[in-house]
Image (spheres, helix red, strand yellow):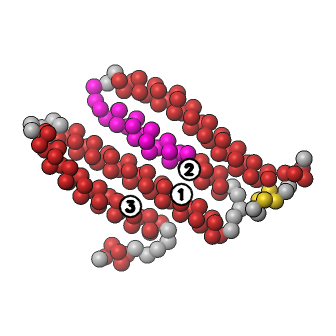
C-alpha cells in the first residue's frame, strides 16, 4: 500500500494528490452545509424584515461568495501540490482573475443597489431610475477599469504608466 501511495504522478505522489482531493471534497462538504443551514435560516429571517438589503446580501452570498469559496478551495488544494513554475503561475493568475471578477461583481451590485434604494425614496422614482441607469453604467466601467488595473498590478506588472496617463 505504501508503494502505491509513493507512486509519482505529474511530479507529486499519489498521497499528495489524495490530500489535495480530500481538501477539495472537505471544502465542498463544508460549503454545502454552510449553504443549506445558514443561508436557509438567513432567508427565513430576511422574509420577516421590511428592508431589502438583507435579501440583497443573501443574493450576493449565493451568487458571488459561494462560487468564490468553491474556487478558493480548488486553488488552495492545488497549492499543496508541486508543479512547474509555469503551471503554478497559471493557477495563480486564473485564481486572481476569478477572485477579482467576483469582488468586482459584488462592488458593482452594491453600488447599483445603493443608488436604486436611494432613488426609490424620492418622488418620480421611475423616471430617476432610468436616468440613474446611465450613471450606473459609467460607474461600473470605472469600477471594472480600476479592478483590471488592480489585477494587472497584482500580477507583477508596473501600472504607474497606466494610472499616470
Which of the marked residues, 2 or 1, is nearer the chain's N terminus? Answer: 2
Q: Is residue 137 above or below residue 56?
A: below
Q: Quadrant of residue 26?
A: top right
Residue density around tag 1, few if under 14, some if 14–19, many if 20 or more, within 10 Å: some
For image coordinates 75% across by 62% down, the residue present is 10
Q: Which residue is mark 1?
A: 95
**Which residue does the numbered mark 2 point to in the structure image?**
72
In the orientation shown, which residue stands out farthest toward the left?
Answer: 123
Q: Is residue 12 toward the left or the right of residue 150 in the image? A: right
The foreground one among 70 and 79 is 70
Q: Which residue is mark 3?
A: 147
- 25 or 160: nearer the viewer: 25
Residue under the point 60% across and 36% down: 30
Tags 2 and 1 touching, CB below 8 Å: yes
Q: State how far apart marks 2 and 3 are (Cα).
A: 19 Å
- Label 3: few (<14), some or many (≥20) within 10 Å? some
Q: How many labels were placed on the picture?
A: 3
* Residue range of the region highlighted in magenta in the rendering: 50-71
Task: Say which element carries label 1.
Answer: helix
> What main secondary structure does the magenta stretch of the protein show?
helix
Q: Dot 3: what SS?
A: helix
Q: CA distance from mark 2 to mark 1?
A: 7 Å
Identify the image quadrant of the C terminus: bottom left
Amino acid at each position: 500500500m505504501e508503494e502505491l501511495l509513493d507512486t509519482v504522478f505529474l511530479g507529486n505522489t499519489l498521497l499528495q494528490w489524495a490530500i489535495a482531493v480530500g481538501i477539495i471534497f472537505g471544502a465542498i462538504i463544508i460549503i454545502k452545509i454552510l449553504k443549506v443551514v445558514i443561508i436557509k435560516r438567513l432567508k427565513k429571517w430576511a422574509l420577516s424584515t421590511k428592508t431589502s438589503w438583507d435579501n440583497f446580501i443573501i443574493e450576493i452570498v449565493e451568487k458571488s461568495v459561494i462560487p468564490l469559496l468553491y474556487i478558493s478551495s480548488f486553488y488552495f488544494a492545488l497549492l499543496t501540490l508541486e508543479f512547474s513554475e509555469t503551471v503554478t503561475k497559471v493557477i495563480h493568475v486564473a485564481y486572481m482573475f476569478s477572485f477579482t471578477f467576483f469582488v468586482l461583481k459584488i462592488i458593482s451590485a452594491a453600488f447599483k443597489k445603493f443608488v436604486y434604494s436611494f432613488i426609490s425614496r424620492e418622488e418620480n422614482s421611475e423616471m430617476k431610475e432610468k436616468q440613474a441607469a446611465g450613471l450606473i453604467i459609467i460607474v461600473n466601467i470605472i469600477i471594472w477599469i480600476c479592478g483590471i488595473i488592480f489585477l494587472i498590478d497584482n500580477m507583477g506588472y508596473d501600472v504607474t504608466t497606466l494610472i499616470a496617463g
